[in-house]
Amino acid sequence: MRLIALLALPLAACTATAADRAAIADQAAGLQRELTGLTPGATTSCLPITRQSQTKAYGDTIVYVVSRGLKYTTRTGGGCERIGRGDAFITRSVLGRTCRGDIATTFDPVARFQTGSCSFGDFTEYRRR
């Protein structure tokens, strides 16, 4: 009986609460609003840094806003969600562009410490047609 209880404990810890499910739904709705009126296009492994202007986070998805009619999204493994709450977003690149697999960090500008990190996936272009 103890073995069953010990095996069930990790499963219970991974179960999403109602608040977690509501937060995920809010993030999905925010991402949908962000991309409303835009059509998905090509997927690329790198994004030129000069094309990035504003960065937003919706859960584990990051949106690079180039203009109202051009945005790029990338999925991360999670860890950079705090840019949605005002943390600074720091990327490092040696090639002058942000690429799949590059690692970014988030930084609390008030408390002055690192708050998270994430790795980029492929970038999908969204354009107004």
Image (cartoon, grey):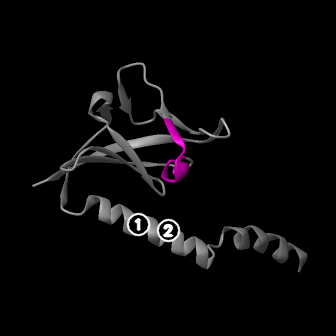
Locate the N terminus and report the quarter of the image it occupies.
Answer: bottom right
Q: Nearer the viewer, residue 73 or 86?
A: 86
Residue 49 figure quarter: top left
Q: Position of residue 127 (x, y in %)?
A: 17, 50
**Residue 78 visible at all:** no
Residue 73 place in picture, x, y as percent:
33, 49
Residue 89, placed above or below residue 24: above
Residue 72 sits above or below residue 93 on the image: below
Q: Which three-letter amino acid code belongs to the residue tagged 2? A: Ile
Q: Residues within 10 Å of mark 1 (few under 14, many from 20)?
A: some
Residue plotted at (32% across, 33% down): 46
The residue segment tinted magenta is 80-89
Q: Could you say where residue 15 lies in the image, as x and y percent from the top left?
A: 65, 73
Image x and y of residue 20, in percent:
58, 71
The answer to whether residue 102 is seen in the rendering is yes
Q: CA distance from mark 2 to mark 1?
A: 6 Å
Q: Residue at x 60, y 75 (%)?
A: 19
According to the picture, the residue beneath numbered tag 2 turns out to be 24
Which element is circle 2 on?
helix
User: Which dot marks residue 66?
Assistant: none
